[in-house]
Image (tube, rainbow, N blue to C red):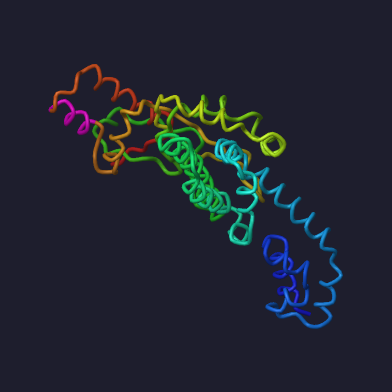
Amino acid sequence: MSFPEQERALFDLLFDRPLRDRFCRDPVHALSGYDLDAEERRDFTVIRPDALALDAYLRADFILSHLCRAFPLAFSIASSLAAGLDLLRGLIDTRTMRTPPDDRPATFGTRLREKMSTEVFTSDREKAAVLAIVEAELGMAMTAGALRRSMAAGTPVPPPAPVAPGADWKLRPLQLATFVSATVLPQSYPALKQALRPAGDSELWAQLSRNPLPASVRASTLEKEDPRVLLARARASRPSACDVDVNHATVELSEGFAPLFQHLDGRTSAGEILAQMRRVGTPEALLQGIEAAFRQLLDAGMLKVGR
């Protein structure tokens, strides 16, 4: 008996829609590419096509309800497209599902970003806003996955509460901390959630499945521009022997801070950045605001200081 091959065939039938359609028409031919003996093939032929389709649908729905929690705005926006729900369901396939669980949200989000980049929106500005939102949630999914992998490997991870920087922090090189993502969004992330997310994260997929977000709400919301830099730090909560819950601490800064991130390379200090800006005539009040922003990011654990 070839149990691994039977498992592979059943897995593919559940998550490969074209194969499942072929199986419903001609089970023997559809399974010809699997190393199954005659008895195993007969076992598959008694599967009812309607039961198989229902099983596949319910599994995909359950998986989407969990992925939706990592991509609440991306799911809401996708649902507002003409075939958006089908787009989301179509990504629950063998390519996504063969990805290790800790990497699956990032794989799904990467593919969703690719799909959204080919969609038509009311303007190039709206499309850029949509892709920025997807990018922000993908960044958080990636840092969450990286944190889970590190904890599974037994690698020491930063504590949930950031360590206070020393008094000489302005003289030491700065860089983004581990498990931190940074994205420029068209508006504040909480404001976007309030406008575009019609339910809490745990109920969102069920709500969108029944009542997709109206395209008019998406368009009117993304007409507004109040850019923010969103920084999000993945942190573990309630770790257990079998799973790690991850949430994100966030900080938002004005868009003008974004160009400074290229200097957070682990070699340049805040003092050097401020001195260079002072030499080119940056107003002192603005320099004080930038210094305060650096300190805010340090206090939130978004940056780390070198030696």
Residue at (63% x, 39% y) in the render: 238
Residue 19 appears at what percent x and percent y? 69, 67
Residue at (49% x, 43% y) in the render: 120
Residue at (61% x, 31% y) in the render: 214
Residue 81 appears at what percent x and percent y? 58, 40
Decide whether residue 273 is among the magenta residues. Answer: yes
Residue 174 appears at what percent x and percent y? 30, 38
Residue 199 appears at what percent x and percent y? 66, 29
Residue 212 is drawn in which quadrant?
Answer: top right
Q: Which is nearer the eye, 270 or 197?
A: 197
User: In this image, 13 relative to 247: left or right?
Assistant: right
Viewport quadrant of the C terminus: top left
User: In this image, 187 relative to 24: left or right?
Assistant: left
Decide whether residue 70 is among the magenta residues. Answer: no
Above or below, comparing residue 30 to residue 168 in the picture? below
Magenta stretch: dominant secondary structure: helix
Which residues fall within the magenta stretch? 271-279
Q: Which is nearer the eye, 103 or 172?
A: 103
Residue at (57% x, 33% y) in the render: 215
Above or below, comparing residue 96 to residue 225 in the picture? below
